[in-house]
Image (cartoon, rainbow, N blue to C red):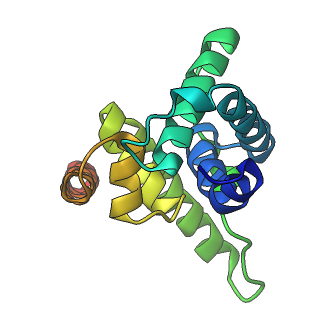
Amino acid sequence: MQNIEEVYKQHSNTVYKYLFCLTGKEDVAEELTQETFVIAVKKIYQFKGNCKISVWLCQIAKHLWYKELKKSKKHKSISIEDLTEEIEETQTTEDIVCKNEEKLALFKNMQKLEGQAREVMYLRMIGNLNFIEIGEILGKTPNWARVTFYRAKQKIKEVIENGEKKQM
């Protein structure tokens, strides 16, 4: 077993990205990342080594997030303002409004997806994780993650296209 300091250096960023995808808030993700490693130190004897340590840590992180949700008793969706990139000065106001509307529509449609499909979309698009990492975090294969992402993307595309047809 590696030194806990080495484990923290190697995996804290992955755990943080995962928690940020779940919470949508930097401060909450940072706090839960720290709590994850505190619990990992206390429960290291339970780690059997039958999966990667990053997967085990993300499972702890996920359970902490669920515990946090139960405490607050309300699930807030990720705010679009927290996720948008800085806007270039050369863009017109019309461009800015259009892009924000498109992002808002995308995230609204992502919220309509089933739990794991939505989670895969967030991990891929916001967390910038590859399909191998997503599969490990969710306890599935990389191929499952890839197919789930593709199907979710297609479902969102269909909803957007059908919405545009209804407006015409």
Q: Position of residue 92 (x, y in %)?
A: 68, 81
Above-or-below relation of 24 to 145: above
Q: Position of residue 162 (x, y in %)?
A: 20, 51
At x 51%, y 47%, the residue is 53
Instruction: Tell me, yes or no, if residue 26 can be seen here.
Output: yes
Q: Nearer the viewer, residue 152 or 100?
A: 152
Q: Quadrant of the C terminus?
A: bottom left
Instruction: Tell me, yes or no, if residue 105 can be seen here.
Output: no
Q: Position of residue 142 (x, y in %)?
A: 26, 58
Above-or-below relation of 43 to 57: above
Q: Position of residue 110 (x, y in %)?
A: 39, 45
Q: Nearer the viewer, residue 79 or 35?
A: 35
Q: Residue furthest bottom?
A: 90
At x 60%, y 41%, the residue is 78
Above-or-below relation of 109 to 99: above
Horizontal arrangement in the rendering, residue 115 relative to residue 122 (left or right): left
At x 71%, y 41%, the residue is 33
Q: Residue furthest front?
A: 1
Q: Nearer the viewer, residue 100 or 54?
A: 54
At x 64%, y 56%, the residue is 83
Horizontal arrangement in the rendering, residue 110 relative to residue 57 (left or right): left
Q: Nearer the viewer, residue 88 or 123?
A: 123
- Number of numbered discs on residues: 0
- Where residue 157 sits, quadrant-wise, is bottom left
Horizontal arrangement in the rendering, residue 112 relative to residue 28 (left or right): left
